[in-house]
Each structure stands twice: as structure tokens, then as C-alpha cells.
Amino acid sequence: MYKFDLPLDTREANAIARRRNCEEQRKSRIFDARTRQIGVDTAGLAAQIEEKRLRNQVENERKNAYDSEMIKNSQICTLLDTRQKNDTMRQNVELNKFRAEQQNAASRREFDLYDPESKKKDKPARVSDDDPRCQVSGLQLFQGEDLSAPERKKLQQEQMREWIKQQLSEKNREKEAARHAEALYQKKMMELDARAVQLAKEEEECRRNLNLATKNYNAALDAERKAKESIDKQKELDDNFTELSNQVFGDTLTENPGVAQSSFGAHRVITDRWKGMSAEQKADIQKIREQQQAEKQRKMEEEKELQKEYERSQLLQANAAILMERETARKAAEVEKKIAEENMRLQKEQKDALTRLTKEVYTNPPTDAYFSQFNTGTR
């Protein structure tokens, strides 16, 4: 029996599927008229790439901001944790110190139960006649007994004596303190008065010295001002005299022609010192002007001759141009006539060729079945 249901090779099946997928992709590229004729939108792709780059840049900046904020928060948390640990340590130290100082074993409520010296600290069986511990069954107190009467009276007298002494001593201390305060007040007032008198004297002396110094300074300034004014006045007189001498005996009023000579050449003068030209210079200038006028007249005559020659040449050129235009127009008319005849001949030939193609050559036009066999594959 033949085994027709055997499975195909997986590798071969994958290769066939890959080729089919590539073929479908190739069809989509080739049969897409827009992509085939226009191409890929590079500007749009560039804009998308730029947008993606900006989005990644913004995302990176936001991520960096989050990271910096996270680092800052971590540092703050570390600082707060360290501060909390230090506060806890300090509180524990203070708590242990308080416990050692204020909560020792002797201050506990049940310390009397396990006090090793409880018997030494314990009261005797009977302290006085009014001891509440002396009950009838204890046989410690009997009717009519007053064993502590002398001690009580003596204690009361001693207490009264101490009270009186204490009151007297307090009164004496108060009087002594008041006397001492009054003495200190009087002494302080005397010191303040003496200090005020001394400051007043010093202020008066300082004011007197300041006025004297101001007076001396003003006198010195006045003397200096007068001396400066005298010097300035004498200097102004000297300057005026010098200026008058320079104006009178100088080259300006004497009109010395040598002062206008420039150091850059004999043909150059200094304009602010020049007093005019000499007779020789004026004669030279007049001679040069006459020469220039004669030269100008000669050039004008030459220009007139040239202008006449130019006008004669322009007239000849205009006549020649008119003749050439007429010849060109005649030739153009002949060419247009020939072109029209040639176009008529070509039109007749094209019409005869179209008639022959329609009636003799293209007698079997293609149908839709002929065109449907194209663009079915990419190979």
C-alpha cells in the first residue's frame, strides 16, 4: 500500500513559504503605481526620524531629570536616616543617663521589700505616745502614760527659739542689704556725676581745639587762594604781553610769504598761512589757461569732425540694413511657401497611411482576454 499521507519536509515547507512571502512582497512593490513612479517620501521619513530623535531626546532628558531627582531624594533620605539615627542614639544616651540618675534602685516603689539595710532603717516598736502602730494587742502603750512630754516641751522651746533667731537674722540681713544697696546707689550716682563733668570738660576742650584748627585751616586756605590768584594774575599778564608781541612781530601781520612754504615740496603751500600769489605765479597761471583754451578748441574741432564721420557711417549702415531686411523678408516668404507645400504633401501621406492601417493592417483588434494575461507575476 502506498503512503500518500506522509508529512512533507519541514525545511522544504519553510523555504516554499518564504519564497511565496517574498513573491507577495515583490508584487506589492511592483504593482503599486504610486511607489513605482513617485518613490519613497524621503522628506516625510526625515521628518519622522527627526521627530523620533527629538522624542528620544526629550525622553532621555526626562529620564535624566528623574534620575537626578531620585539621587537627590536618595541623598535626602540618607541624610534624614542618619539624622534620625543620631537623634535616636542621643535619646538613648539621655534616656540611659536619666535612668542612671533618676531611676536608680533606691527610688523604686518596692525597694523596701529587698533593701539590705531595711532593719537599720526600720522604726523601733514605739516612737512616741501617739504612734499609730501601738495597738492594744501590742502592749506598747498604756493609759495615762506621757513619756515624751519633757522632750516635746524642750523641742517646742528650741523650735520657738530658732524661729525667733531666724526672723531676727532675716531682718538684719534685709537692713544690711538695703544699706548696702543705698551706698552702692550713692556711689554710682557720684561716679556718674563725675563722669558727666569730665565728659563735659573734654567736650568743651575738643570743641575749642576743633574751632581753633578750623580757623587755622581757613586762614591757610585763604592765604593759599590769595597767593594762587596773584600767581594766576601775573601769569595772565605775561601771557597777554607775549601774545601781543607775537601778533605784532609775527609772520601773520608782517605777511611773510616764506611761512606758507610746505615741507612736502616747493609746489605745495600751507593754506592757513598763505597770503596770496605773486605776479610771476599769476602770469604763469594765465599762460597755462590760454594753452588749455587752445587745446580745448582743438579737441572740440576734432570731436565735430568725428561726429560728422559717425553720422555719415550711421546713414550708410541704415541703408544697408533696409536692403538686408527686404532680402531677408523675400527669402522668408519663399521658405514659408516651401514649408506650406511640404506640410500639404506630408498631410496627404499621413492620411493615406492611416487609411491603409485602419482598413488593411489593424483588422483584428485585441480583446480583454489578451490584456488580462499581463501583470499576473513578477518574473
Image (cartoon, rainbow, N blue to C red):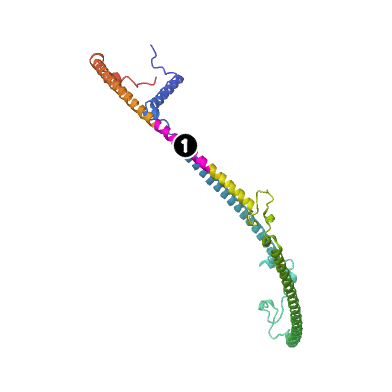
Q: Residue at x 54, y 42 (%)?
A: 295
Kindly identify which residue carries mark 1: 305
The x and y percentages for residue 125 are: 72, 75
Q: Eyeballing the image, is 217 above or below 303?
A: below
- Badge 1 marks a residue whose secondary structure is helix
**Main secondary structure of the magenta stretch:** helix
Part of the protein shown in magenta = 296-316
The x and y percentages for residue 91 are: 65, 60
Crowd around label 1: few <14 · some 14–19 · many ≥20 (10 Å)? few
Locate the N terminus by quadrant: top left
Query: Between 299 and 286, which is closer to the camera in this rendering?
Result: 286
Amino acid on which disc 1 is placed: Glu
Viewer can see residue 161: no
Q: Eyeballing the image, is 27 above or below 2?
A: below
Q: Eyeballing the image, is 148 above or below 252?
A: below
Q: Eyeballing the image, is 248 above or below 350?
A: below
